[in-house]
Image (cartoon, helix red, strand yellow):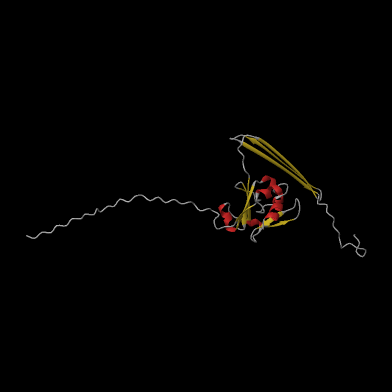
Amino acid sequence: MPGFLQAQMLLDTLDLSEVEIFSNKPDNSAGYKVFQIDSVQIRQFQTQSLSGLITSTTPVFVKSYGHGSLATSSIRGASATHTEVVWNGININSPMPGQADFSQIPVFFADKIMIYYGPGSIFQTSGGLGGSINIETKTNWQNRLNVELLQEVASFKTYSTSAKILVGNPKFQSVTRLFYLNSANNYDYDDISVSRENPPS
């Protein structure tokens, strides 16, 4: 009587050792233009307003009408309402016109300034189609008392005073910053429309 026998020598289950894959989350600003103003430049302009610093150190266009007058920005051709100004994560644009007046923001109040161009700003805030300007302050958690006082005298009877008081310990910090600016803007102006033929009325 014929017979047939077949046996399978291989197991139907294979044990594989585990494979670990590690990856880092890509930076939110990857692929977007981000500009950070150097801390040395911030120290040089700390007695001025934010409009003077941005005009002198960045390609951002700032329309300014002088000390104490309106100063607005334009990033990549967008209007001032499309530029978000954020201070420590808080939007400080005026809710009525939807823009920020850079002449009212002292550089002395900032320790770090970042400029996000175009859509790169949406990772930091919303509504900044042109871009955003992020202002940050740094906290020093050392147990100490620090007092800074700066004064400046400039042309056109311009006077500014800045004061900073830091008090705290490794668990609590209090930072108070004061800024005062006064400018007469008393520059000479020759009115060529006034002459002998056209005396002032």
Q: Going by the picture, which residue comes out furthest to the bottom?
A: 197
Q: 15 or 100: nearer the eye?
A: 15
Q: Is residue 164 visible?
A: yes
Q: How many marks?
A: 0
Question: Quadrant where the N terminus lies?
Answer: bottom left
Residue 106 seen: no
The residue most toward the right is 196
Quadrant containing the C terminus is bottom right
Rendering coords of residue 154 (x, y %): 79, 49
x, y (%) of residue 43? 69, 47
Q: Write the residue at 67% across / 48% down.
A: 40
Viewer-nearest residue: 101 or 118: 118
Name the residue nearer the viewer: 197 or 9: 9
In the picture as drawn, the residue positioned furthest to the front comes out as 9
In the rendered view, tell whether residue 80 sits above or below residue 47: below
Q: Is residue 170 above or below residue 6?
A: above
Residue 72: which quarter of the image? bottom right
At which x and y percent is residue 134?
A: 62, 50
Q: 59 left or right of 20?
A: right
* Whole-percent x, y for residue 80 in the image: 66, 57
